[in-house]
Image (cartoon, rainbow, N blue to C red):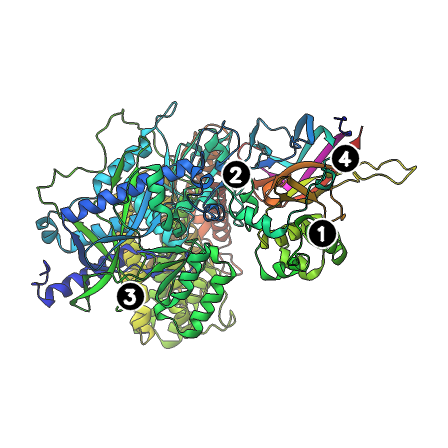
Amino acid sequence: MAAKPQRQYEIKHRTRYDYGGRIDLCHNEARLCPIDSDYQTTKTFKIVVEPSSETVNERIDCFGNRTHFFSIEHSHDELIVTGESRVIVSTKPRPWSKNGFPDPSYESVLAFLENLSGDNVLEIGEFMYPSQAVPRHSELREYALVSFTSNANLIAATTHLMNRIFTDFTYVPGATDVSTPVLEVLSGRRGVCQDFAHLMISCLRSLGFAARYVSGYLETQPPPGQPKLQGADASHAWVELFVPDFGWMPFDPTNDVCPSADHIVLATGRDYFDVQPVRGIFVGVGHQLLSVEVDVIRL
Amino acid sequence: MHWCSNNSPKVFQTWDRATKRFVHEFGAVYSDEKDADNATDRWSLDPVPWILSEKEWKNIEDGVKQRVELGAAILDDLYGPARLLKEQVIPAEIVLRHGGFLRAFRDSDAKTPISPSLGMAAFDLARGPKGKMWLLNQRADSQVGLGFALENRSIVGRVMPSTFQACKVRRLAGFFRSWRQELEGRSWPGREPRIVILTDGTEGSNFESFLLANYLGYTLVRPGDLSVRNRQVWLRSLGGLERVHVIWRTMPGRGLDPLECQSSTTAGIPGLFEAMRAGNVMVYNHPGIGVLESPGWFPFLPAISKLLLDQELTLPTVATWWCGQPSALEYVLQNLSQMVIKSVNVRSNFKTHYGSSLSQAELDHLRNRILADPSTFVGQEQVHFSTVPSLVDGKLEPRTAVLRTFAMRTRRGHVRVLSGGLARAAKDGQPIVSTQEGGVSKDVWIRSETDLAQHRSIWSEDQTNDSNDPVQLPSRTGENLFWTGRYAERADATARYLGRLLSSRIDGFDQPQDIEKRHESFLLSTLLDLFEIPPLTTKDNLDVDRELISLLQDPQRRGSIPAELEGLRYASHEIRDIWSGISLRAIEACVDGWNEARRDANSVFDYYAPLERLLLDLTAFLGLNLESMTRDAGWCLLDAGRRIERAVLLTGILEDGIAKQVPGDLQSLVFESVLTISDSLGTFRRQYRRELRPDRILDLMLKIDNNPRSLAYQLTRLSTILNDLPGKATRKTPKARILNLVEKVKTELSEVDLKVLVEPDPKTGVRTELTKFLGQIRKALLELSDELTVSYFTHTNRGDK
């Protein structure tokens, strides 16, 4: 078998909180370490916290993401968390690149999902039901059903749904925030990658499919002849759909593509709130002004 | 024939009245789990208990024990191998969609040393037509009702002591003794474990937690009192940060750690789960066990019991259908008019619906609601439960009732059931399926056939050495004590002012009308000044009648008696756990007595007697605390609050009454008022037996230190009591700063020459030196109050620059 085409990336993800005053105590959870999978290997990873934290404790959460807990227990007015990693990504095989892989009918997939057993109950079942950012609603189902006509096949219909989200919705940074409900995105027809991912997941789950949220990075190529701008790249989000006999297949509704080696997976969960790259709660009076910089450099 | 049906209506009336009085005096408040914010319903109690024979109880007890073992086995499985899900014993959706299933405790790596286990659980039971007991609900996330079971027993035992003795009723104490041992049983490196009861502060949960805290002697805390540092839990106390080892929570698990729960509330203790993972704190009940509360489990429990325990369930569950399964959904919708429909999430805002009492339109609406998301509903058979005798309007009548039983499980797996419980009887004709829903509560008596073992208290015999380590109060408690003292003193002063005004209205002190009027205006403007109350009209044209009515009656008016009493009630209720029962009754007496006066008064004169009564009640409250509270930091702050407030008010009274220029014809009346309001007129007369003169009044009110109303007395008390504050008084500590402030004022007072103070300015007639002196004293006292607040109450910035 020929060697898989591989790419190597160096990633720096820097999150800065400005508290607008001094606070005495904060507790944080970070999910900044890219996961290991059949198509991706994290060679090195380190997390840097400023001001320094006495301890950083690592655990692996129930979705398999490496999670770091740390606290700052003295007076401070800003917090900078930087995740630095080196990752090797290989091009994911597509179902259609597997010889003769048939696109399953969507009824057969639903029948399969209704009768999950063994490890599948948790590994797939966790991604079938509503979660905090993914509601169940008839409007979402109706939007989705346009793509899932009665004799549709799963991958074709999902690709169709992705095309429609890309066409029907406008990418408008700042139009929404992390707490904007999916139904509002659906009626407002605009948002950012996170909103489109939540929308697509909601549509798929409301039909009974298993779909999960992926946080990660996208390598953006600079225009020819220009150097790549530092910090120009942001963290990204897309969707994975469970396809029986294949596994999780990625869809990026923001860019209308099926991700391959230029999408680097950070973490997966039911929705954004399971995989938030940095989540912090502080004790004291102040506010949190957040700024994020991401550098993805191809080596 | 019921044991008490031979009693005459008169006996019933006596019971009823006594019960109401006790319930009222305890200030019991109940709230629904779902609507904890606004429910402030008084707890209602029917003194006639639900009585069970030993034999009947044995069946219940065995059934409940089995249910606890089953619950424990389910949790071990769910947060461990999850066979129940993987082998399709229960549809995964029931677990995965339930808010009580906390994924934070299902980490993928095995390093995590903890998994949610069952500590205490509650079960609702009802008796079917053939006498068989049926299980209706199970609760694990919080034990709502346990405090009330305790409270009801204490009241009913007092209402009918002889009947209680004669019936050989099994006691509750053994259960609590075991629970204590469970909480205290794990050994911690170093010292005795510090145990707290955590409440989210909603009124109902707060009241129950307070009952339990008081009974067991644990500190009652709110999430904001605790913080996590170094993966350990610390209590913000008057003595600084104190390590906490065991938390008994009465708030839902999913709100406990906002860092790791997808919860919209910011309440909770960030970092708590991490401290639990580190093994540095035990939390009872463990968060994550709330998933057991879903009624969605019910149809599957017989099979689960077979698989996990290899046992048949002895207590049957009321027939339940989980609507997430198509066949069950169809059945429920077909029989909707005979079904009880519940949400699978006991904390959802969906109220339980009884199909039999719904109109066709309501049934259609319910049907659509179920169809929109069937998996979130169950249908239950509406069983017609048998009744228990209940006291209704002085007569015994049959009422259907539900019994909540409580059980605990030790770390070693031993299960113990409370010999009693909490019953709720339905209101007339209404169906009832949960102790959460309305109705009147009842005590539950298990009659023993043999003689009761000698009564043992909940306090176990000492196994360890007594620790004399004083338990420090939470800072919030200290702050509320301080304000309780201040509010009591303010209410006292306001009542004295208004009493003096009313006396003037009643007899005018035999003065000409003009003098009487000017004196009243003088009193009123001094009162408004003292408490910085904006007048209803203008300052120069006060409407004495309107002001009087408003200050006596209007709770919205700043500085009014009802407003000050509300401040007192609020500050003291926030910390109900630290008062003795009798102190609480004294506070209630102040507040209730005044409310009654407001209801009954036809004219301002009707307030005269209640004012006297209020002064008496306030004195009783403060005096009781003198008698019944330990002289610890808490008492010290309560007293400090009183002393500071009293001294500050005194400087104001003297400034207006003595320092200002008062017209000659008013002087003697004003001086008398100053002394009356300061409660020192009698003392003055005994001490001087001469006319009222400013120098004598100043001497008595400032310098004489055996007059409990004088400034000197307040300062002497302050320097004694503040010395008992936690902490060292070495250089530059907050305590040293506080004590220095008091000493500074004492020196100023002892060095001041009264002859200079009493000398009026020849041109204006104002005693400017006195004004200046009083101003300085007041400023220093307020500084003292601020220093206490910063150093002992908030101390968030300790040690940081």
Quarter of the rendering containing residue B338: bottom left
Q: Which residue is mark 4?
A: A295
Is disc 1 in the same subunit as disc 4? yes
Q: Residues within 10 Å of mark 2 (few under 14, many from 20)?
A: some
Distance Cα–Cα, label 1 vs label 4: 27 Å
Magenta-drawn stretch contains B407 = no
- Residues at marks 2 and 4 touching, judged by CB atoms closer than 8 Å: no
Task: Please give the range of residues in magenta.
Answer: A7-24
Looking at marks 2 and 3 on the same chain, the residue that comes earlier in the sequence is marked by 3
Q: Residue at x 46, y 35 (%)?
A: B740
**What's the chain of the residue with tag 2?**
B
Indicate which label's residue lies in the foreground, 2 or 3. 2
Distance Cα–Cα, label 2 vs label 4: 38 Å
Indicate which label's residue lies in the foreground, 1 or 4. 1
Q: Residues within 10 Å of mark 1 (few under 14, many from 20)?
A: many
Q: Residue at x 30, y 49 (%)?
A: B123
**What x and y, as percent, mark residue A36?**
65, 30
User: Hey, what amino acid is under mark 3?
Assistant: Pro
**What x and y, as percent, mark residue B383?**
28, 61
User: Hey, what amino acid is under mark 2?
Assistant: Thr
Magenta-drawn stretch contains A9 = yes
Front-most of A229 and B749?
A229
Question: What number is the disc on residue B610?
Answer: 3
Question: What number is the disc on residue A162?
Answer: 1
Question: What number is the disc on residue B796?
Answer: 2
Q: Secondary structure at mark 1?
A: helix
